[in-house]
Image (cartoon, rainbow, N blue to C red):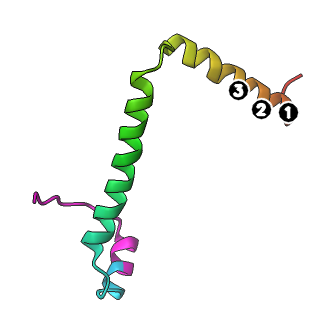
């Protein structure tokens, strides 16, 4: 198994130090696996997609405009 070194904010480190009974490396490993699985799923879905980046931008713009309209930010 490969080792990875992480930098964490001081306030997080203080919490981790208070709870030394928790295997923080296991917590990090599980979080990374969860993220990696989501990325792999997204890769599989996108591999079959015929949308171009331009299509995605256009759809995103329509969604943002629709949300702005819904909340009265535009007419």
Q: Which residue is mark 1?
A: 70
Q: How many other residues sit within 10 Å of disc 3, few (<14), some (14-19) or many (≥20)?
A: few
Answer left or right for 70 relative to 18: right
Q: Nearer the viewer, residue 14 or 21?
A: 21
Q: Using the rendered view, name the quadrant where residue 33 is placed.
A: bottom left
Mark 1, Cα crowd under 10 Å, few <14 / some 14-19 / many 20+, is few
Q: Is residue 60 left or right of residue 19?
A: right
- Specify whether residue 25 is painted magenta: no
Residue 74: x %, y % from top left: 85, 25
| Residue 34: % across, % down | 38, 55
Which image quadrant is residue 17 in?
A: bottom left
Mark identifier at residue 63: 3
Residues at marks 1 and 3, CA–CA distance in whole angstroms: 10 Å
Residues drawn in magenta = 1-15
Q: Secondary structure at mark 3?
A: helix
Q: Predominant secondary structure in magenta?
A: loop
Q: Nearer the viewer, residue 43 or 66?
A: 43
The answer to whether residue 30 is above or below residue 69 is below
Q: Residue at x 24, y 60 (%)?
A: 6
Distance between the Cα atoms at labels 2 and 1?
A: 5 Å
Describe the element under mark 1 as helix, strand or loop. helix
Q: Do tag 2 and tag 3 residues touch (Cβ < 8 Å)?
A: yes
The residue at the point 70 percent across, 28 percent down is 64
- Which quadrant is home to the N terminus? bottom left
Marks 1 & 3, CB-CB < 8 Å contact: no
Badge 2 element: helix
**Residue at the spot of label 2:** 67
Residue at 38% x, 50% y is 35
15, above or below 30, in the image? below
């Amino acid at each position: 198994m490969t080792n990875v070194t992480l930098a964490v904010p001081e306030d997080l480190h203080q919490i981790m130090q208070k709870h030394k009974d928790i295997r923080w490396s296991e917590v990090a490993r599980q979080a990374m696996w969860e993220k990696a699985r989501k990325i792999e799923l997204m890769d599989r879905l996108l591999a079959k997609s015929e949308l171009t980046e331009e299509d995605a931008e256009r759809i995103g713009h329509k969604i943002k405009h629709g949300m702005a309209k819904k909340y009265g930010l535009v007419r």
